[in-house]
Amino acid sequence: MKIAVIEYRKTPPKTAQELIEAIERKGHTPVYLKAHLLDAKITTRGVEVYHGPNPVDVDAALMRNIGLYLSPDTFLKRIGVIEALASKIPVVNNPTATLVTRDKWRCLLKLHLTGLPVPETLVTENPFSAMRFTNEKKKVVYKPIIGSLGLGGTLIQDPDISFHITRSLKNLGLPSYYQEFLEKPGFDYRVFVVGDRVIGAMKRISSSWKTNIAQGASGVRVEESEAPEVFQIAIKAVKTLGLDYAGVDVAYDLNTGKHYILEVNAFPNWEGLRRATGVNPPEIIVEYLVEKTKK
């Protein structure tokens, strides 16, 4: 079986390389495809997908990353081409589903509308709305709508700062995204789901309000018996969003005594989880894709 790994860099970064190696260990042939070289055509013969001048000839594909800081047109082109590929072969994660998860607001909205717990969140272009939300909540977190690794997240307690941030972004033609601050007990959870099961979970412990591993937090393995509600919420979130695998961030709020989904990442890193749990996600993701292709 020929399995593509889709990335945008000239050479495979670590996560893509690990998927390539897992494909080889399973006895299959990896094919590295660069997202910007993928084209699609609608023809009288049907949908055709090319990598440069060459037709894409694979049995399945893993979409790992299509690029950072893309223009809306380029982002939609790359997703659209992979959607064309997904009309012919299994692609993990499903590109249409990743459209929602790439956007923090649309992701949380979909989860909320299906009854899953998420923090109170505002998306706006109005600096006065941002100021009122901060004044009401006392503490909020500004986040880029599209982003990862905790980069750009800012804790705000002064409504005037929210006003200033939103006005500045509005002048650049950009919206603002604010989430109420949850009083965590010094940790939150990262739950890694593949298919319909949790393959590993960890507490991300930090003295900072940011608990991303990339921001210096440490991971400690968590069993389902320790946090059954967290595991159940994560599985439901991945199913709701139509994803094949994802990293789900869940936090416990000391003020309300409830768990909330902070984010769902359709392109999660896994090194921190692997160190904490001993689980090797690339192996399991490839196994899952192979089984899906056989069905």
Image (spheres, rainbow, N blue to C red):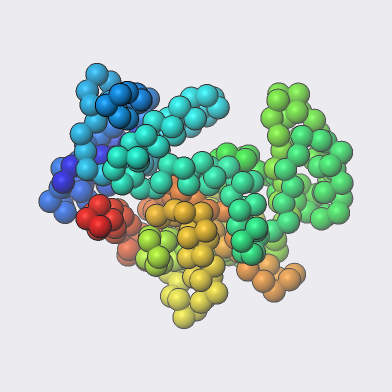
Can residue 175 be seen in this snapshot?
Answer: yes
Which quadrant: the C terminus? bottom left
Residue at (43% x, 60% y) in the render: 192
Query: Is 115 located above or below residue 10 in the figure?
Result: below
Identify the residue at the far front of this view: 44
Residue 132, percent from left and from top: 87, 46
Q: Position of residue 32 (x, y in %)?
A: 25, 34
User: Is residue 206 shown to the viewer in this render?
Assistant: no
Please say if 100 is above or below 225: above
Q: Along the horizontal axis of the image, is 98 left or right of 175?
A: left
As rendered, which of 48 and 213 lies closer to the eye? 48
Say which of 214 and 84 sits in front.
84
- Left or right: residue 230 versus residue 169 is left
Q: Nearer the viewer, residue 140 or 289?
A: 289
In the rendering, at what x and y percent does residue 31 appear?
A: 21, 36
Question: Looking at the image, which residue is at 39% across and 54% down?
Answer: 244
Tally of numbered tags? 0
Q: Quadrant of residue 146?
A: top right
Hey, which quadrant is residue 184 in on the image? bottom right
Q: Is residue 229 above or below residue 156?
A: below
Q: Residue furthest top?
A: 53
Instruction: Please state the horizontal and vertical placement of residue 87, each as a whole percent of the image.
Output: 35, 40
